Image: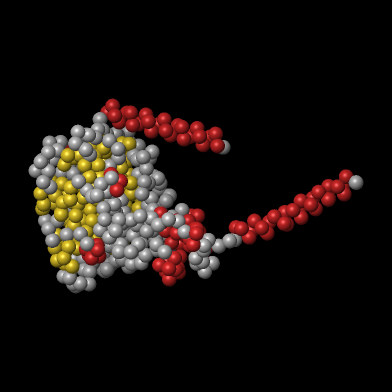
């Protein structure tokens, strides 16, 4: 009797499972739709470039925009070529403020959507449109409740002729600053939509009389006299927001040294580049000063690549004061393969901070560390920038593996440096930051243990 009752219970259980399982499987196999599942991903990770009148070749804002590109999207997304995010996922810090990479789940959602025939879905599931600045709008203006930047500094015009070789335009422009002003945000933009097609990158270097060598752009004496680099803009970058209570300082009589790389756009284009500066209100002085440093191999001695070879180069930057590293951006050209930033502490301890293992010259991405992981490094730390260049036929971007490649501005030449933002602080403030970080880490560990 007992045995029969047990068998009856087991039979009922299997019967119930048989009823439940198909329903669960059906729900799990329901294909994603554009309106419900894909549009939110595109808004978050793709529309910054893939929207009308932006830099991408097609828009992904609407289903009608995206559907014709479904197969191409699948290929690029599955290979993690798009969105461009080349940080090595197995090395160093992995939390970034501007992380535009797709999670594994997001990649699989997009792949499943396309494999299912890319269904549109119900229109009522479509999220509200994301607001973007129209054409040449300023990204940060609305953040500060303004119509635009407090100061706009323009380069002098340059005409890039159709079919002409790459050009480096280097005018010098006065800032017009008559009193010290602290900067809380910066953005650079080409002056027109057509200008975006020919402007590969634009560097704004701030020349001003600095009394403290701490704020020099580089350990290289030929660059140190120019003061801290203000900002480097390239495709894939929008601007720089200073961490609260930190900023960059502009002094009276300062100048902007422009270094603008123009390429062939297929037609004659005359354009300028604009630097938008957002100030802290007068009387509101941030506690910490931030500098964008150029670190790594910066000259011919540091970049010397034989034909048909993979070459490693190294460059070093000494921290003259305690500081927090805010961001890391590799800069190389067509032979660029990988770049790594390592901190060698005064104790001899070595920490690999970040590595880009699949560098892509078309995307000059600056990786901004999240607040709770931005490296806090003591005075005397050496930041080591290691770069690898691939001058072989296996590098599909290599125009000619049979030539010797040296340092130079041209795309066919090479560079091997990183742009690194550092916020400096004295001993007492540095200790306070370290204590706060340790407390935050301890709290996080405790929460994890409680969840387990």
Above or below, 319 relative to 72: above
Q: Which sits in the foreground, 35 or 181?
A: 35
Residue 408: percent from left, percent from top: 18, 59
Q: Is residue 139 left or right of residue 33?
A: left
Above or below, 445 relative to 12: above
Q: Which sits in the foreground, 408 or 328?
A: 328
Residue 52: percent from left, percent from top: 33, 64
Quarter residue 50 falls in: bottom left
The residue lying at 66 percent from left, 58 percent from top is 23
Q: Which sits in the foreground, 130 or 266?
A: 130
Q: Is residue 9 left or right of residue 55?
A: right
- Residue most toward the right? 1
- Quadrant showing the C terminus: top right
The residue lying at 21 percent from left, 56 percent from top is 202
Answer whether residue 94 is visible to the viewer in this image: yes
Answer whether residue 76 is visible to the viewer in this image: no
The residue lying at 22 percent from left, 72 percent from top is 266
Above or below, 309 relative to 98: below
Residue 433: percent from left, percent from top: 33, 31
């Amino acid at each position: 009797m007992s045995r029969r009752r047990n068998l009856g219970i087991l039979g009922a259980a299997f019967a119930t499972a048989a009823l439940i399982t198909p329903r669960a499987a059906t729900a799990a196999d329901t294909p994603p739709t554009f309106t419900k599942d894909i549009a939110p991903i595109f808004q978050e990770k793709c529309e910054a470039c893939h929207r009308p009148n932006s830099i991408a070749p097609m828009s992904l804002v609407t289903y009608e925009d995206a559907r014709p590109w479904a197969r191409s999207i699948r290929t690029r997304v599955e290979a993690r070529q798009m969105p461009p995010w080349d940080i090595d996922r197995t090395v160093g810090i992995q939390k970034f403020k501007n992380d535009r990479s797709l999670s594994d789940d997001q990649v699989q959602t997009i792949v499943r959507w396309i494999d299912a025939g890319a269904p549109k879905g119900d229109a009522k599931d479509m999220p509200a449109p994301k607001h973007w600045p129209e054409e040449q709008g300023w990204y940060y203006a609305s953040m500060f409740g303004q119509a635009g930047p407090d100061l706009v500094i323009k380069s002098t015009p340059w005409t890039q002729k159709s079919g002409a070789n790459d050009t480096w335009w280097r005018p010098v422009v006065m800032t017009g600053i008559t009193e010290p002003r602290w900067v809380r945000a910066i953005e650079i933009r080409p002056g027109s939509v057509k200008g975006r097609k020919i402007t590969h990158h634009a560097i704004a270097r701030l020349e001003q009389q600095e009394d403290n060598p701490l704020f020099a752009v580089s350990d290289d004496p030929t660059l140190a006299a120019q003061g801290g680099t203000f900002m480097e803009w390239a495709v894939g970058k929008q601007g720089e927001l200073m961490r609260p209570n930190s900023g960059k300082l502009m002094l009276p009589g300062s100048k902007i040294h422009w270094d603008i790389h123009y390429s062939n756009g297929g037609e004659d284009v005359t354009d300028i580049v604009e630097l938008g500066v957002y100030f802290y209100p007068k009387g509101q002085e941030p506690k910490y000063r931030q500098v964008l440093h150029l670190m790594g191999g910066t000259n011919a001695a540091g970049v010397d690549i034989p034909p048909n070879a993979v070459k490693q180069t190294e460059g070093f930057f000494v921290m003259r004061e305690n500081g927090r590293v805010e961001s890391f951006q590799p800069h190389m050209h067509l032979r660029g393969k990988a770049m790594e930033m390592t901190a060698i502490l005064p104790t001899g301890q070595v920490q690999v901070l970040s590595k880009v293992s699949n560098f892509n010259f078309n995307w000059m991405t600056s990786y901004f560390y999240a607040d709770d992981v931005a490296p806090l490094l003591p005075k005397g730390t050496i930041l080591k920038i290691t770069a690898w260049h691939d001058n072989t036929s296996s590098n599909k971007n290599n125009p000619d593996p049979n030539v010797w490649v040296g340092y130079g501005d041209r795309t066919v030449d090479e560079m091997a440096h990183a742009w690194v933002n550092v916020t400096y602080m004295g001993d007492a403030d540095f200790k306070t930051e370290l204590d706060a970080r340790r407390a935050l880490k301890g709290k996080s560990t405790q929460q994890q243990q409680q969840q387990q």
